[in-house]
Image (cartoon, rainbow, N blue to C red):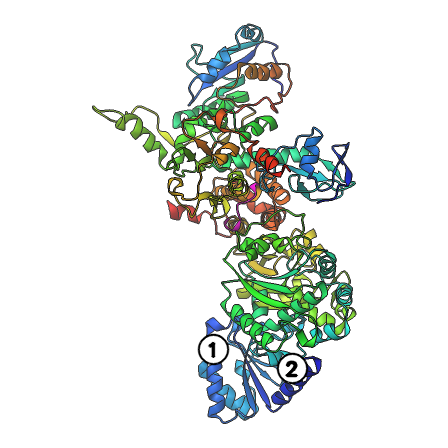
Amino acid sequence: MTTNSTITLKIDGVQISVPEGTTILKAAKNNGILIPTLCDLEGLTPYGGCRLCLVEVTGSPKLFPACTTPANSGMEVTTNSERLKNYRKMAIQMLMSERVHICAVCVANDHCELQALANQLGVDHVAFERNFTREPIDSSHGFLVIDRNRCILCTRCIRVCDKIEGVHTLDLKKRSKNTEVIMDLDEFWGDSCSCTGCRKCAKVCPVGAIYIEGEAITQTKNRDVAEFITARRNRK
Amino acid sequence: MSTTNTTGSKVRVATVWLSGCAGCHMSFLDQDERIVDLAKKIQVVYSPLVDTKKFPEKVDVTLIEGSVANEEQLEMLKDIRVKTRVLIALGDCAVTGNVTALRNSWENSDQEVLERAYKLSEDLQAAVPNMVPKLLVKTRPLHEIVKVDFYIPGCPPSADLINYVLTELLVGKTPIMEGRARYG
Amino acid sequence: MNLSDIQKIAEEENEFQRAYKYRINVCCSSGCVPFGAFKVLKAFDDAVKEFGVEKICKVARTGCVGTCSVGPAVLVDPGEHLYQCVTPENVREIVQSHIVSGVPVKKYLYNNGGYFRKQQRLVLRNAGKIDPTRIQDYISVGGYFALAKCLSTMTPQGVIQEITSSGLRGRGGAGFPVGQKWGLVARAHNTPKYIVANLDEGDPGVFANRTLAEADPHAIIEGMLIAGYAIDAQKGYIYIRSEYPLAIEALQKAIVQAKSMNLLGDNILGTQYKFDLELRFGAGAFVAGEETAILVSVEGRRAQPRPRPPYPANQGLWNKPTLIQNVESLANAPLIVLNGGTWFKSFGLPNCTGTKCFSLTGEINNPGLIEVPMGITLREIVYDIGGGIPNGRKFKAVLVGGPSGGCLPESLLEAQIDYDSLKNVGAIMGSGGIVVLNEDSCMVDTARYFTDFCIEESCGKCTPCRAGLARVKEIFDKITTGKGELNDIGVLENASEYINNASLCGLGQTAPNPILTTLRYFREEYLEHIVDKQCKAGVCFKNESAEE
């Protein structure tokens, strides 16, 4: 994407010009149109897993994740139709019912992106029966704690560990609803020989799954960390 | 859904306290002077705040705080649904189960929770009392048992939100929760 | 080696085979091996020697004949006499009567003419007829002639044009035009380019690709060589499930043989064209058959699909242009090159040409591997080829397209087999699985069963497929244990529609198909379960009492 050519598209009826190769999400954001996201984080490789940023493109029956789809010339994108609103509510409900998400007793209460989205999108209840998982909490590390019952598998922690810290301590094991974030070869965090304790995983976690013991959540969370470091690195 | 009742008299409102901490009722009271305005239009016919023993017939609006954790509450909720036109789940416990549902992570959580509360924490004469209603295996939010018409999430929901929903309903409008609802 | 050498090998092999008056083909495919096919093969070897007819009778190990339900199957040429359920004990009788005296043993013959009548064997042209472990057998029936034709007389663009003109569409399920795909990869600027042949057939009850690899591995290799020439790729991978030992063995042998004959490697057939081939084994994940997941798996990472664009044709393996094609599509390529696209168009429908292999299973008289021309109706498959429902039971539904296909009722049996008609009725071509269900099946339970499969196989990446399907299953559990409520149907429908539209890859997008089609065609059964709390087929509600 070295070309400097500019393309023009329409998002929600607004004519927008962006450099070629820009994703729909960024094109929208740069022009003040906010598309809800969970797994996406500026500075990390787009993942396309949470399906909240799905948008409609005129002429295609399919929905496209705005975070990974490049904006094309002449595209007409709708980001907020009734159908998309319903789908987003559905996604939030599915995430909230998948594991234990009890805001009132969560370390990330009020600083949680899932909670914020549920509020913002008006998910006033969860139509599905809620699942109550009981994964043991791993607090073996000196200060980092992971509560997998709160994990929404956005893999931000994995990507920040791999791409920004360059360590790849974290990864996934198993599949389907049993998917879990693990350290090294499924060891206790305290036994991990690769973890540098850089805290970036806790900084970017959208929910309260990874947090730092004894530290206020407001102090921990720093979702711009990946963007900041990437920008610094790319500075010539 | 209109709440104006047919006779033109005051709207009959009930508030109910199931498995919850009373925080939602506190929040209800937190409406402060706005309650005076509300009181001109509504009549509280049943509530932990008033002295009525039996849930009355033909209630227009019932606000329920708390989840359903035992058999007594289960029966009560079903009875309330029959006698109520508009049923509102008030607060996170009623909407999601919230803290009261934390025990659901355990299998046989009904046994487990009694053991912990009455036996493990007592040194002398530890025993589970036999007069408490039988606990359900899992604590459930209201809508898993009966049809719920409106949800007011929050732990507790803010007085403003409760007031907004009630005033909207009283003028026959449907409250819009987008951007107003707030979990936790 | 060059074209004339190939022709020479073919002539020699034909000469060699003509010396035999009889040829006994023993099916040693995965369907027949469990019934003792290898023992039967040895028994034939022994019996032929015992009767002293080894000079006039060749005993050959072959791939699938197609009649998987009556294995071990043995085909005796000339005359294509097909023996069914052969045991080592009755081998002597067959050899004595058929080979020595020239009288086929009628009582052992497969007498179901209808099974083959409506089939059209293009991809499976050599299945059951040649020995997959001998490259000479393949060359003797015209194998590698197409490759030689490409290299000597056709330009890469010419090959693509020929494939495009044939109208061949991808047999992996989605039906994307093969020629167009080849063109996209050929036009991609980046190099090197790769080919990945998809042999990760993970669906329960589907065995078409497996059988093809076991019966005719060289057809796949030749197809890849032709594709490689057309798109200018020099490296190919066959991604195969490690659960397919026989197919892996066949392909490994075939690759070694092809290399030794200079059909793989550098300077293929004396030209500048070079192409190398490697097997990659799947670790048992259904989702690894998805085209973006297969790429990361070949690269050696966790098989998780990624969103498209970028499409693999531009950024595939190691971000290089990659052609991913199902092995069945690839096996068609030699035929098209050799006979021309116009010839290929004479099979099937004008807008959906050729044939399709299906694994026909379930409550049906003649289960097995079939290959039918596009445009055949489901009724013809179920009744003419499949021979109807056994034991006088009534037909209830047919599941087309594997675990994420659609359940179609009797009224839709006239539906044609082609990508668009199937899609219109809610089914998919998919991996080519057809499961026939009789009146003893409960459609709610069937939908639950296949949903269960997709839940287990979901990679866990995207919300709808991972979290959504699990919620859907809970609703099914409620309905099938008598706790269902009427509004559950609505929740099921909404969730299914959402999963269908919002999932990242084909697995999630098609997973709700059994639910949506059963809700569409068998809604009354859901109502029975929910309102009357009864399951007429007597399948549901049992588990609950067993558990209590």
Q: Residue at x 48, y 93 (%)?
A: C51
Mark 2: amino acid: Ser
Residue C260 vs residue A32, the one in the foreground: C260
Chief secondary structure of the magenta portion: loop
Q: Which residue is mark 2?
A: C140
The spot of residue C363 in percent (x, y) is: 54, 62
Compare marks 1 and 2 and give the one earlier in the sequence: 1
Q: Mark 1, residues whose alpha carbon is within 10 Å: few (<14), some, or many (≥20)? A: some
Q: Which residue is mark 1?
A: C38
The spot of residue C385 in percent (x, y) is: 63, 68
- What is the chain identity of the residue bearing mark 1? C
Q: Are marks 1 and 2 in contact (CB under 8 Å)?
A: no
The spot of residue A136 in percent (x, y) is: 38, 38
Residue interval drawn in magenta: C456-463
- Give left or right: position of B181 versus A136: right
Q: Residue at x 58, y 77 (%)?
A: C260
**Residue C376 vertical position relative to residue B140 in the rendered view, above or below:** below
Give residue C122's quadrant in the image: bottom right
- What is the chain identity of the residue bearing mark 2? C
**Residue A224 vertical position relative to residue C141 in the rendered view, above or below:** above
